[in-house]
Image (cartoon, rainbow, N blue to C red):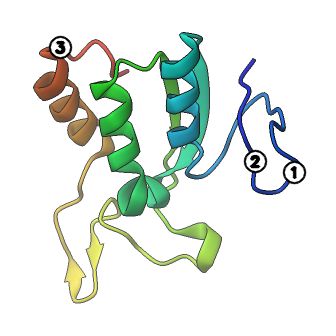
Amino acid sequence: MLYTFSPYLPPCARYDTLYGERHIQAAGYSVSTGEKAAAVIGDSTFFHSGIPGILNALYHNADLLVIVLDNHITSMTGGQPHIGTGTGIRGKKKKVMIEDILSDVASNISGEQEHIL
């Protein structure tokens, strides 16, 4: 079970899982307590603000499972494309793959890629 702070409930609110950018809090929880943690993030959030939190989690050896829900669109705000869709403002672009980013980051920080499924 993951315990974390929430801006929506009184201090020390408890959650079983977290969504959005809560992977940052989950990593902090894991590092500070030594317990496993899990969080869920969407693909769009991963690209616009999720990568730094995952970098820090890897760097600090957090025992963290981050589940990236990849539906290839920014569905929360109207369906805009993002860099993982392969569609740019002026047409087709090279699609940036989440697995490639995570694999490269993991191997550069830890020298291993075992973190990435």
Residue, x 23% and y 59% (percent of image)? 95
Identify the residue at horizontal 41%, vertical 74% (top origin).
81
Residue at 68%, 39% in the rendered image: 18
Q: Earlier in the sequence, mark 1 or mark 3?
A: 1
**Residue 72: x and y, percent?**
45, 59
Name the side, left or right, on which 78 lies relative to 44. Answer: right
The reply to whether dot 1 and dot 3 touch (C-beta < 8 Å) is no
Residue 35 lies, in percent from the top left, at: 59, 11
- Residue designated by label 3: 112
Callout 2: SS: loop
Left-right relation of 105 to 36:
left
In the foreground, 35 or 48: 35
Res 6 label: 2
Residue 13 rendering spot, x and y as whole percentages: 84, 38
Secondary structure beneath label 1: loop
Question: Few, some or many C-alpha atoms within 10 Å of disc 2 (few <14, some 14-19, many ≥20)?
Answer: some
Q: Are marks 2 and 1 in contact (CB under 8 Å)?
A: yes
Between the residue at mark 3 and the residue at mark 2, the CA separation in whole angstroms equals 33 Å
Distance from Cα at disc 2 to Cα at disc 1: 6 Å
Q: Quadrant of residue 53?
A: top left
On the picture, is 26 further left or further right than 107?
right
Between the residue at mark 1 and the residue at mark 3, the CA separation in whole angstroms equals 38 Å
Q: Residues within 10 Å of mark 1 (few under 14, many from 20)?
A: few
* Sequence-first disc among 3 and 2: 2
Residue drawn at x 17%, y 13% as measured from the top left: 112
